[in-house]
Amino acid sequence: MPLTDVELCSAALVKIGAAVITSFEDETAEADVAMRLYELTLQGLITSHPWHFTLAQAELAALEEAPQAGFSRVFALPQDALRTISAGADSRATGSIYHVAGSRLFADAGRIFLSYQRRPATSEFPPFFVQAFIARLAAEFCLPLTEGTSRSEVLYKLAAAELRVAKLADSQQATPRAVDDFTLIMARSR
């Protein structure tokens, strides 16, 4: 059963021994800290790794404005894009040389397909990510709520360990990439 934003924060607050919240609008220090740090922490964790559940693809719309950075075309990035993974002239979204600036992508191709990270709904978070995210929230909440620096350091180490486990689980969500063209493989087969 997926957890809500508030339930994720409450789980993190329990880990540091603080009072749980029922809403971000509660008039408590816990709710204030949770409201201020939740989305920042989430976006930071999402963009730290190309999580499979955050990936999306889109064909970009060309813009009429003047290109820059030595490219001939300008494209609008999707509104929900947090981080660009790759871009290309076909639906594989790979192979194009591009530059991202703000909400625009600059390239020379006539059409661009983009692979990117988006902020998914909380209900889409897989269990391995939920555990890592709660651990990271607990580490972020600890110092402002408890002022315990040594406890905060321990929580950051635990969060880093949970993140490693989550990245391993996420890496098993797709077929591993094969090495197609590598000179040592070609030399060995001769």
Image: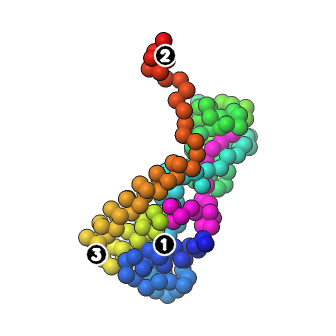
Q: Is residue 178 above or below residue 16?
A: above
The numbered dot on residue 148 is 3
Q: Residue tagged by mark 1?
A: 36
Q: Residue tagged by mark 2?
A: 189
- In the image, residue 49 lies in the stretch drawn in magenta: no
How far across and how far down the image is residue 12, in percent?
A: 44, 74
The residue most toward the bottom is 27
Q: Quadrant of residue 142?
A: bottom left
Q: Is residue 13 above or below residue 152?
A: below
How far across and how far down the image is residue 134, in percent?
A: 46, 69
Q: Is residue 121 above or below residue 87?
A: below
Q: Quadrant of residue 18?
A: bottom left
Mark 1: amino acid: Arg
How far across and how far down the image is residue 20, in percent?
A: 47, 83
Check contact, mark 3 vs mark 2: CB within 8 A. Answer: no
Q: How many other residues sit within 10 Å of disc 1, few (<14), some (14-19) or many (≥20)?
A: few
> For the residue labelled by badge 3, is the local secondary structure a helix, a strand or a loop?
loop
How far across and how far down the image is residue 190, in percent?
A: 48, 12
Task: Write down the region rendered in magenta.
Answer: 113-130
